[in-house]
Image: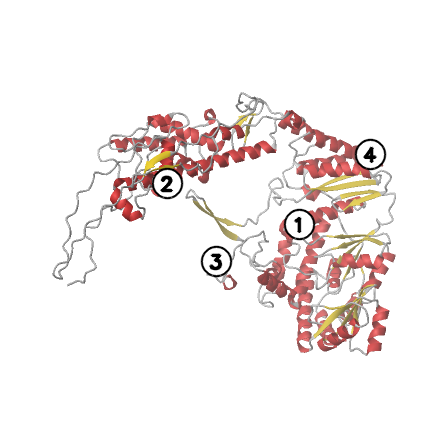
């Protein structure tokens, strides 16, 4: 953005990315203004207001684009799954013009119809594909790779499992991450797709109004910025303990809601540090409103403690026993805070104590890293926070858990009694976090699938380090550098293959997909690829009947398509002022490609080697590239023609008065090479080529008796040399022959019919329509696809071929013509303009005043004598 606007202090910002549009928290509906500006001068402004009433089920639409689609098959035998995959592969190979979303939905409908009931499905197969070609490759990979395997899992999106082997398909545990996992724009794609998540953030904004400098949602989803430093400041603002904890609470609830909507629900819940509060809320112990209030209180109290007693933490790559022994042996003033993994222990203490511990432990041949936190959680440094939190808990209603919750503090299940839950949660902030024990006891209780329900994949990595090669599966709803929809598709596909009760109906709901079987989809696609005789194939270059044969390029005598040779114009002999003859070879064209070459490039002949694709009439990509190059060549040729006309105009100015031209332009008596070359190209003859004569300077009178010299009499000027008239450029369709010049050299306007023919030709060249397809009364943009850019190109082409812009204000003429809606409107405008020019005096309504160029020589020349 421009540097003249201080966006940091302005309510305005440039919205460069899709963001949740959250309400202000009051009862007013959301409103916005939408402006549309076009190059042709269009200016539309619409005010929109949020509709808060109910929708009919048929009117509800899900317009969120998916980064990939899910294909899922559940059968009673391996052979049945193979048949389903093979049938889909055959249909994809033999059919073109397939819609991936419709294909996935139809496969889901077929699976629901064919799936064995009463638990009879023992073989599951799922794919995540981002295109039909991607699906085809994954089907082929599965059919050649699954033989003899009980499971098959590819990170690209292939998941297969014979559920007779259920060792790692047991109970599900949701894990909620704690402080440190927060990121700006976390889970944004999922929040955008679920309006219910908007209500969650809007409620938090309203409840915490005044507690934070700005609404909580604006920390999570800030306005777009353009510099690395600005993004780092936004992340630092979110990392503030007061902001990070309630923000992570909202993200955890949004993730839980999204997974529950697809039927993925937990048997156990647990969290890491602050994440345990979210787990208690999901289990029904805390209400969502109480979670927001407690999260704000915990963040506020923790920050107050850290300001009064600055502290921090560090990660030691060692187990608990070794770390405790080293702390005692080295007499370090720190304590163990987190037991994250068998090979990672977190220590906490004052800033000075942690710095000393990092230095001492680094000498013990162990890796130690200080963490970017400003508080020491889960140790005695938070003793003051324990009492303050206990007081806050007194105003909160605790309920018995509906889902089994495991504790960081004990590593075991939470008690059922609400008072005991309250007391245990108060200890949570000052006692060590025993995550290793917690995961071990969850595994012993039957948990085999661990789903990280929040931003990042930190907990998934810790679970893998704790359980090692024991059978288990870790899933995450968020992954760095991957779109939210794609990661959700991967999670659902893998959960489906594990035998979890995944409901894919919400994935396809309200997307406008048809209730069709795969067989019907393939049949419809084949019919679409082989349309009737009234169908036309249209691209940016031309249109032709779908069933028609493409016209081959013109062939030379040898049988191969050859461009017409480029003939260099003959060199011109010019006479220098000193009487010597010299050759001035004409300049080469700026772009030496003949129009025949362009026509040859724009014609495509299907190759028999294309097989079924050619049989369906699809053009090769190479031919499309050729068409684009041909259009580029035409554009460059037109630019060359404009430059040539500019040089012609300059030559006419110089030819108006040779004496003045030589002095004003700085050129001497030497002829100007590029002017000679251009005129030689137009007419290869030396006759009439302008050569600026040597300037005739006035003679200076000698001074006499100290008097100033008198002006010498002005010599009679030689008659000016007239420039040769330029040959008229014929139009492609011959209409240009109607344009002539009168005796004074002024161009005459072509007839209306000739102008109309050139207009249609220009439209054909830029739209690809044939002339018989053009309806002169059709709306140019809505019906013919002629937008403001194409309209300017067409009018510029007509301006070059016709003289209706001469002595006119081009900007006003373009503005007037751009306002016309139909081709007939342009033809009528030209007809009226032509008639007005034929009247005495012509039309002055759009003429632009021009300053005449002074070509006269100086009247006198001053001498070097001093003035009297």
Q: Secondary structure at mark 2?
A: helix
Tell whether 429 sits left or right of 782: right
Residue 251: in sight, yes or no? yes
Q: Earlier along the polypeptide chain: callout 4 or callout 3?
A: 3
Q: Which mark is residue 2?
A: 3
Q: For residue 159, which quarter of the picture? A: top right
Q: What percent of the width, then of the height, locates residue 404?
A: 81, 58
- The furthest residue to the left: 705
Tell whether 674 sits left or right of 12: left
Q: For residue 158, which quarter of the picture? A: top right
Instruction: Look at the image and name its color scheme.
Output: secondary structure
Residue in view at x 52 percent, y 63 percent: 8
Q: Earlier along the polypeptide chain: callout 3 or callout 2?
A: 3
The crowding category of the residue bearing disc 4, from other C-alpha atoms within 10 Å (few below 14, some 14 to 19, many at least 20), is some
Cα distance, mark 3 to mark 2?
45 Å
Q: Earlier along the polypeptide chain: callout 4 or callout 2?
A: 4
Q: Is residue 344 above or below residue 155?
A: below
* Residue at which label 1 appears: 483
Q: What percent of the width, then of the height, locates residue 212?
A: 60, 67
The crowding category of the residue bearing disc 3, from other C-alpha atoms within 10 Å (few below 14, some 14 to 19, many at least 20), is few
Q: Secondary structure at mark 1?
A: loop
Q: Which mark is residue 673?
A: 2
Indicate which label's residue lies in the foreground, 1 or 2.
2
Tell whether 176 sits left or right of 33: right
The crowding category of the residue bearing disc 2, from other C-alpha atoms within 10 Å (few below 14, some 14 to 19, many at least 20), is few
Q: Is residue 527 above or below residue 712?
A: above
Q: What percent of the width, then of the height, locates residue 72?
A: 75, 40
Q: What percent of the width, then of the height, locates residue 76?
A: 84, 37
* Residue at which label 4 appears: 80
In contact (CB < 8 Å): disc 4 and disc 1? no
Cα distance, mark 3 to mark 1?
30 Å
Residue in the foreground of this view, choosing between 630 and 221 = 630
């Amino acid at each position: 953005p421009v540097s003249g606007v201080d966006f940091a202090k302005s309510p305005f910002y440039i919205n460069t990315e899709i963001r949740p549009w959250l309400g202000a928290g009051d009862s007013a509906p959301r409103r916005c203004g939408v402006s549309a500006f076009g190059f042709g001068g269009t200016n539309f402004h619409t005010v929109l207001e949020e509709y808060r009433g109910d929708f009919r089920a048929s009117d509800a639409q899900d317009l969120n684009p998916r980064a990939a689609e899910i294909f899922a098959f559940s059968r009673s035998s391996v052979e049945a799954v193979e048949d389903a995959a093979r049938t889909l592969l055959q249909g994809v190979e033999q059919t073109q013009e397939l819609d991936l979303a419709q294909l996935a939905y139809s496969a889901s409908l077929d699976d629901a119809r064919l799936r064995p009931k009463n638990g009879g499905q023992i073989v599951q197969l799922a794919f995540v594909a981002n295109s039909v070609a991607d699906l085809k490759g994954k089907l082929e990979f599965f059919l050649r790779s699954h033989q003899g395997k009980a499971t098959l899992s590819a990170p690209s999106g292939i998941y297969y499992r014979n559920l007779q082997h259920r060792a790692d398909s047991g109970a599900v545990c949701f894990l909620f991450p704690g402080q440190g996992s927060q990121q700006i724009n976390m889970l944004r794609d999922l929040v955008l797709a679920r309006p219910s998540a908007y209500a969650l953030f809007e409620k938090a904004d309203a409840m915490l109004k005044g507690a934070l400098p700005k609404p909580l949602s604006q920390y999570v989803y800030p306005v777009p910025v353009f510099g690395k430093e600005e993004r780092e400041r936004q992340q630092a603002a979110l990392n503030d303990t007061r902001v990070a904890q309630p923000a992570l609470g909202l993200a955890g609830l949004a993730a839980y809601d999204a997974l529950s909507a697809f039927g993925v629900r937990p048997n156990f819940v647990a969290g890491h540090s602050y994440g345990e509060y979210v787990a208690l809320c999901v289990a029904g112990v805390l209400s969502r409103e109480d979670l927001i209030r407690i999260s704000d209180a915990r963040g506020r109290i923790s920050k107050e403690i850290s300001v009064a007693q600055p502290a921090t933490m560090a990660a030691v790559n060692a187990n608990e026993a070794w770390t405790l022994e080293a702390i005692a042996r080295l007499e370090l003033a720190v304590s163990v805070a987190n037991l994250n993994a068998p090979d990672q222990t977190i220590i906490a203490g004052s800033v000075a104590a942690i710095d000393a511990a990092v230095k001492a432990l680094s000498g013990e041949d162990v890796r130690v890293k200080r963490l970017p936190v400003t508080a020491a959680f889960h140790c005695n440094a938070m003793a003051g926070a324990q009492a303050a939190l206990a007081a806050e808990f007194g105003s909160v209603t605790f309920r018995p858990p509906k889902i089994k919750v495991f504790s960081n503090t004990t590593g075991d299940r939470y008690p059922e009694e609400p008072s005991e839950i309250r007391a245990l949660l108060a200890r949570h902030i000052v006692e060590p976090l025993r995550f290793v024990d917690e995961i071990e006891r969850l595994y012993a209780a039957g948990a085999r699938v661990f789903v990280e329900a929040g931003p990042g994949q930190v907990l998934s990595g810790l679970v893998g380090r704790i359980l090692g090669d024991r059978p288990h599966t870790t899933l995450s709803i968020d992954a760095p550098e991957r779109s939210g929809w794609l990661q959700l598709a991967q999670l659902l596909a893998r959960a489906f293959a594990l035998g979890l009760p995944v409901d894919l109906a919400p994935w396809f709901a309200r997307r406008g997909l048809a209730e069709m079987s795969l067989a019907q989809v393939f049949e419809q696609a084949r019919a679409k690829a082989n349309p009737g005789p009234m169908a036309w194939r249209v691209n940016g270059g031309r249109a032709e009947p779908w069933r028609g044969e493409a016209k081959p390029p013109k062939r030379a005598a040898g049988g191969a398509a050859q461009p017409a040779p480029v003939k260099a114009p003959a060199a011109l002999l010019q006479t220098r002022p000193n009487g010597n003859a010299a050759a001035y070879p004409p300049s080469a064209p700026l772009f030496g490609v003949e129009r025949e070459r362009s026509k040859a490039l724009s014609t495509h002949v299907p190759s028999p080697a294309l097989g079924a694709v050619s049989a369906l009439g699809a053009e090769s990509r190479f031919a499309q590239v050729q068409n684009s190059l041909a259009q580029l060549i035409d554009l460059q040729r037109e630019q060359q023609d404009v430059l040539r006309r500019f040089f012609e105009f300059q030559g006419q100015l110089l030819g108006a008065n040779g004496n003045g031209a030589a002095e004003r332009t700085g050129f001497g008596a030497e002829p100007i090479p590029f002017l000679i070359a251009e005129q030689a190209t137009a007419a290869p003859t030396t006759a009439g080529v302008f050569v600026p004569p040597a300037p005739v300077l006035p003679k200076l009178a000698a001074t006499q008796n100290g008097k100033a010299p008198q002006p010498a009499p002005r010599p009679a000027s030689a008659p000016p040399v007239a420039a040769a008239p330029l040959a008229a450029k014929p139009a492609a369709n011959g209409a240009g022959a109607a344009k002539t010049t009168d005796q004074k050299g002024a161009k005459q306007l072509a007839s209306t019919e000739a102008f109309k023919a050139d207009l249609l030709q220009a439209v054909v060249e830029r739209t690809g329509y044939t002339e018989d397809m053009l309806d002169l009364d059709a709306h140019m943009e809505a019906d013919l696809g002629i937008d403001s850019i194409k309209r300017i190109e067409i009018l510029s082409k007509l301006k070059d071929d016709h003289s209706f812009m001469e002595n006119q204000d081009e900007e006003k003429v373009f503005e007037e013509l751009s306002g016309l809606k139909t081709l007939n409107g342009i033809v009528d405008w030209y007809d009226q303009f032509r008639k007005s020019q034929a009247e005495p005096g012509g039309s002055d309504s759009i003429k632009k005043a021009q300053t005449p160029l002074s070509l006269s020589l100086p009247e006198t020349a001053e001498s070097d004598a001093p003035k009297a």
